[in-house]
Amino acid sequence: MTGGERPQHLEVLEVSANYFSMLGTSAHIGRVFDPRDDVPGFGEAIVISDSLWARGFGRDPGVLGRKMQLGQ
């Protein structure tokens, strides 16, 4: 991933829009996925873990809306 202070190797999961509701969890800031995210063309979104938010972004709430590059 690039877009933070330094590139990082991450484990990525591709999940359905109801993933977080099934787990009964919500976001500390921002939002988790909802049914709109399954609509083609709606927009691409990612949800990052609290630990990535802390170590990669210093818990900066300004991370919301930033573009990040995920490569292979």
Image: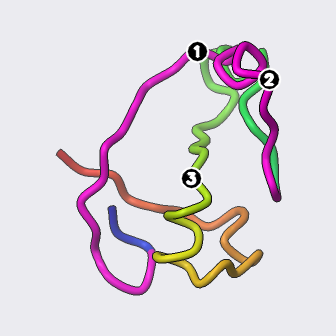
x and y, in percent, of residue 30 in the image = 81, 53
Amino acid bearing label 3: Ser
Q: Amino acid at mark 2?
A: Gly
Give the SS element for disc 2: loop
Q: Which mark is residue 16?
A: 1
Q: CA distance from mark 3 to mark 2?
A: 15 Å
- Name the disc covering residue 24, or none: 2
Q: Is residue 49 left or right of residue 42?
A: left
Kindly identify the amino acid type of the residue bearing the numbered disc 1: Ser
Residue 9 placement (x, y as % from top left): 24, 60
Q: Which is more toward the observer, 20 or 64?
A: 20
Q: How is the image coloured?
A: rainbow
Number of residues whose C-alpha sits closer than 10 Å to that of mark 3, classed few (under 14), some (14–19) or many (20 or more): few
Residue 34 in which image quadrant: top right
Asked if residue 15 is among those painted magenta in the image, a careful observer would answer yes
Circle 1 Cα neighbour tier, 10 Å, few/some/many (<14 / 14–19 / ≥20)? few
Report, in whole angstroms, how far the alpha carbon at label 2 lies from the one at label 1.
14 Å
Q: Is residue 36 visible?
A: no
Tell me what residue is drawn at x 80 percent, y 23 percent. 24
* Tag 1 secondary structure: loop
Q: Quadrant of the N terminus?
A: bottom left
Q: Residue at x 59, y 84 (%)?
A: 58
Q: Say which label, 3 or 1, has the lower sequence index.
A: 1
Position above or below: 10 against 26? below
- Magenta residues span 4-29
* Nearer the observer, 28 or 47: 28
Q: Residue at x 43, y 73 (%)?
A: 3
The residue tagged 3 is 49
